[in-house]
Image: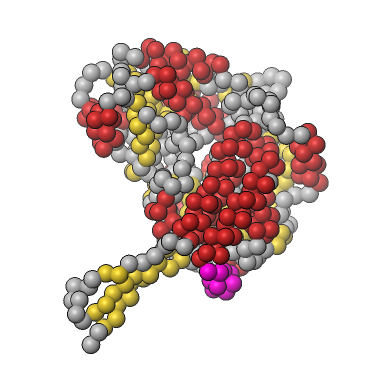
Amino acid sequence: MNAPFSATTLDGIRADLAAAPRLLFIDGKFVPAASGETFEVIDPATGQVFAHAAAGDRADIDLAVQAARRALDGPWSKVIPSQRARLMIKLADLIEQHGEELALLESLDNGMPFMMAKFAAVLGAAEQLRYNAGWATKLTGETIDPSWPGEYHSFTLREPVGVVGSIVPWNFPFVMAVAKIAPALAAGCTIVLKPAEQTPLTAVKLGELIAAAGFPDGTVNIVTGFGKTAGAAIVEHPGVDKVSFTGSTVTGRSILRAATGNLKRVTLELGGKSPVVVFPDADLAKAIPSAAMGIFGNAGQVCAAGSRLFVHERVYDEVLEGVSRMAAGLKVGAGLAPGTQMGPLVSQTQLERVLGYIDSGAGEGATVGIGGARIEGEGYGGYFVQPTVLTGTAAGMKVVEEEIFGPVLCAMKFGDGDIDAIAKSANESDYGLAASIWTRDMSDGLRLAKRIKAGTVRINGGGAGVDPAIPLGGFKQSGWGRENGRAGVEAYTEIKAVTIGLN
Ligand code: ADP
Ligand code: MG
């Protein structure tokens, strides 16, 4: 599989990035940070700096929030819903037209395979906009029969929640950024978006496309910078009405605390430790590759990754052998190297974290069935780890309890027993983001689905793919609220009840 881009394009992008730092996008203009500071952007495949981005901080966030407020009260409030939808669809078209460049940037910046950047990230982003554009004209309140119908007439309105601070992580930088702004725009909000410091580049490019699409200045503002500075400034800003955050549970907790000042609305899409349950009657030809790519896809840097595999003892050996064979056969390499199926981890921090977990698993008695080591040498200067399967793992081990966010699968066995016992094991986690169940017996599948505490359950469904139409979010410490679907867009609205006295 050759990556279908011309070297000139990639060279052009590299030259562009080397020539000047990327800027902030505030009030429709590209500007440097008020401080003049920039930070380094590192290629995770080489560990080398290949770009710089403006280090936005409190002063820049303040300008961005002011611009978002002016747009909210001014020009954006006058854009009628069908026109909002039209702008969003225009942006989706522009994203597709610039798909090649966006995918190159995404792959360079994050390390994900080019094909994944193209299909999962860039086209996924365009679909987020098209799906949510449909809601712009369909969000509506309801008429309600009041308790004293003869005396009153009541109805509700759904109004935009206001200025939204969107904070996104580095694992799927572009689609996450777009998935945050799309429902907010549909609901009539304005936005200050902060990409992760590890992966700022495609968000900056998004600013260019937003300007080209014709959104009023200030509707979407994009401030690159660090979490502790720019991110914290968003969460603490009294002019921000809602924060929508995707990232780690630890950071989610600190965001919740920091949002108390003006009691911002907060949506949190956090970590996971999602179970994959394979019954003995499952279609293993489908379950095996799905279980493998559900943890090795994007090098396991997926919040809904299936990181705990529970397999019935009758098919355990077959499933483990299949998953291990896939792990060993995956072509690991730079995102832009032809044929790459799994890229590097995003950063040195992430590399150390993942290797630390593998060591800890071995220390607690797990067996490294396959993989388990860093990959180094020619072409592997960056943060590469082998796809890894740990066996002999059990509840209580750190590797089974904590989110590793790397290509590390913990495999466990279950025997004949009732659905409640399987559900109990699957639910033995502080997280509750997603779950997969593989069985041909739909009543078993459904009974287990109903008992599992997770926001997304798939029966015989592949991987951790995200559908803009299907709600996503967590039970327990995996988050607050839902993204995607009707619930996702309604989370950007306030309900106002209006009652008219009839006497
Ligand atoms: P990681 O620990 O892997 O970097 P995080 O959850 O901390 O993951 O980061 C996700 C996003 O949250 C990034 O955009 C990051 O800059 C931002 N962030 C980190 N810390 C804070 C914070 N204290 N306040 C606001 N945003 C933050
Ligand atoms: Mg962090």
Above or below, 501 against 184 in this view is below
Percent across and percent down for residue 89 are 58, 55
Pick out the residue farthest to the bottom. 503
Tell me the magenta residue range.
70-80
Decide whether residue 79 is among the magenta residues.
Answer: yes
Percent across and percent down for residue 424 are 26, 31
Determine whether, in the image, residue 349 is placed left or right of residue 396.
right
Decide whether residue 138 is among the magenta residues.
Answer: no
The residue lying at 45 percent from left, 35 percent from top is 464
| Of 133 and 273, the residue lying toward us | 133
The residue lying at 59 percent from left, 45 percent from top is 174
Percent across and percent down for residue 34 are 70, 61
The residue lying at 49 percent from left, 51 percent from top is 131
Above or below, 137 against 383 in this view is below
The reply to whether residue 449 is visible in this rendering is yes
Determine whether, in the image, residue 276 is placed left or right of residue 289.
left
The reply to whether residue 62 is visible in this rendering is no
Image quarter (top left, top right, bottom left or bottom right) of the C terminus: bottom left
Q: Magenta stretch: dominant SS?
A: helix
Above or below, 291 against 370 in this view is below
The image quarter containing residue 366 is top left
Image quarter (top left, top right, bottom left or bottom right) of the N terminus: top right
The residue lying at 72 percent from left, 38 percent from top is 49
